[in-house]
Image (cartoon, rainbow, N blue to C red):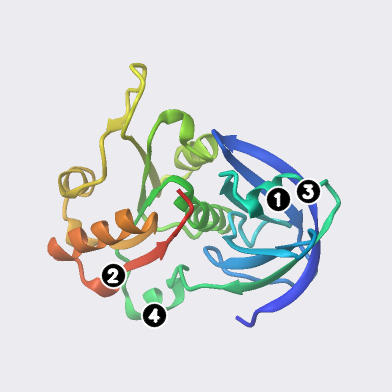
Amino acid sequence: MTSTVFATRLMEKIPRAGDIVSFRFERPEGYQYLAGQWHVVTIPVSPEPLTHHFTHSSSPTEPFLEFTTRMRGTQFKNALDSLPLGVQVEMEGPFGSFTLATASATATGDRRPLVFITGGIGITPVRSILRWQVDTGSALPEVLLYANSSENAIAFRDELDGMAATSPDIRVVHIVSRPSPAWIGRQGHVDAEMLADELGDVASHTYYVSGPPPMVLALRDTLVAHGVDRDSVKTELFEGYQ
């Protein structure tokens, strides 16, 4: 899919969880992308414009463009937070290959269940993919293992749980490493024991892993060590996002 440069306007800022905020923009006519891809955003500030890349947290089935990020107090994030609604920004995209290979999988007869493993803001491409699957009715049997430090940091929690409640093919498992006493879900970190407990035969799935590089690389090594073919593990590293 060929990338393009275009102008768009900020429509809405949506708090998600903790310091996580979604920024929603007009979607230009003709702009096409695949669920899970990313784009580059340039905002008009003085003395020089600032540029950053973000994954689409929106789905191609939605009429707007959205990215979701942690507001960490950097120069770019501060400028982004200060943008008034209606301001024009420049975007370029789409880029990236953290996308579903459903056509090739169907052609080769590979219909193995999908497992998405993500942590923190790494949920953004997964939300895009799951939203697209639900909207198009194309979900395979699949599991989302979503790790966060606390239950108050779970972005898109209600929407993800709603997808699981309405789609028989989607199961969502929240994992919290520092839970409150009220938390009744899974605790700790995603490791080999948890994978076996949740998935059974770990080697019989196709994996999409996104999040902080240490987490993603460690999980990839764990999966390969437990018999998963390296080509069956697709990764997206979110450097500097945590």
Q: Amino acid at mark 1?
A: Leu
Question: Which residue, as the protein is rendered here, is positioned at the far top?
Answer: 181
Amino acid at pointer 3 = Leu
The residue located at (59%, 37%) in the rendering is: 16
Q: Is residue 205 left or right of residue 182?
A: left
Seen at 55% across and 67% down, the residue is 37
Mark 3, other Cα within 10 Å: few <14 / some 14–19 / many ≥20: some
Whether residue 168 can be seen here: yes
Mark 4, secondary structure of its residue: helix
Amino acid identity at mark 4: Ala
Badge 2: residue crowd in 10 Å (few <14, some 14–19, many ≥20):
some
Could you say which disc has been placed on residue 130 in the image?
none
Q: Position of residue 79 (x, y in %)?
A: 71, 50
Q: Which residue is mark 3?
A: 83
Where is residue 122? Give x, y as percent: 45, 52
The label number, if any, that marks residue 107 in the structure image: 4
Do labels 1 and 4 touch, CB within 8 Å? no
Q: Residue at x 84, y 54 (%)?
A: 87
